[in-house]
């Protein structure tokens, strides 16, 4: 879990908005893009490829007392595309 970013939203006026998985996914992708600039450049050995940046977001659904969770993996560099 050291390489995974975990974000839990459990307070705030807009929790009802982020209970929907689509909006939570958009927030996760936006956070990955914002954090990509702030993360230190890691020097990998030449034979190893950079791994994606996994992030897990969870948002509390207050009426149901349950969490909606979304996991997202994005490329470590802008414009990098990986084949499926």
Image: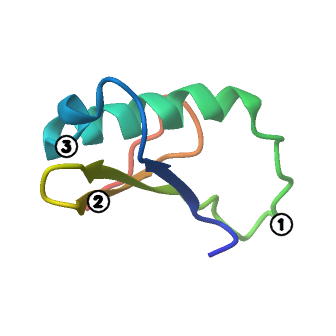
**Which disc, if any, is residue 45?**
1
Q: Residues within 10 Å of mark 2 (few under 14, many from 20)?
A: some
Q: Earlier in the sequence, mark 1 or mark 2?
A: 1
The residue identified by callout 3 is 19
Whole-angstrom CA distance, mark 1 to mark 2, is 34 Å
Q: Residue at point 58% right, 45% down?
A: 76
- Residue 8 place in picture, x, y as percent: 46, 52
Q: Earlier in the sequence, mark 3 or mark 1?
A: 3
Which callout, 1 or 2, points to the residue nearer the camera? Answer: 2
- Residue 41 place in picture, x, y as percent: 82, 42
Q: Is mark 1 on a helix, strand or loop?
A: loop
Q: Residue at point 58% right, 64% down?
A: 4
Whole-angstrom CA distance, mark 2 to mark 3, is 9 Å
- Residue 58 place in picture, x, y as percent: 36, 55
| Residue 68 placement, left or right of 42 | left
Q: How crowded is mark 1: few (under 14 residues within 10 Å), some or many (20 or more)?
A: few
Label 2 near label 1: C-beta < 8 Å? no
Label 3 near label 2: C-beta < 8 Å? no
| Figure quadrant of the N terminus | bottom right
| Residue 23 placement, left or right of 36 | left
Q: Residue at point 75% right, 30% down?
A: 38
Question: Relative to the observer, which residue lies in front, 30 or 16?
Answer: 16
**Which disc, if any, is residue 69?**
2
Question: Relative to the observer, which residue lies in front, 68 or 64?
Answer: 64
| Figure quadrant of the C terminus | bottom left
Name the residue at the bottom extreme.
1
Q: Residue at point 15% right, 39% down?
A: 22
Whole-angstrom CA distance, mark 3 to mark 1, is 40 Å
């Amino acid at each position: 879990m050291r390489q995974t970013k975990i974000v839990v939203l459990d307070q705030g006026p807009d929790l009802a908005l982020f209970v929907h998985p689509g909006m939570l996914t958009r927030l996760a992708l936006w956070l990955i893009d914002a954090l990509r600039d702030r993360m230190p450049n890691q020097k990998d050995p030449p034979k190893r490829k950079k791994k994606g940046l996994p992030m897990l977001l969870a948002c509390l659904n207050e009426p149901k007392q349950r969490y909606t969770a979304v996991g997202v993996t994005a490329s470590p560099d802008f414009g990098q595309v990986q084949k499926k």
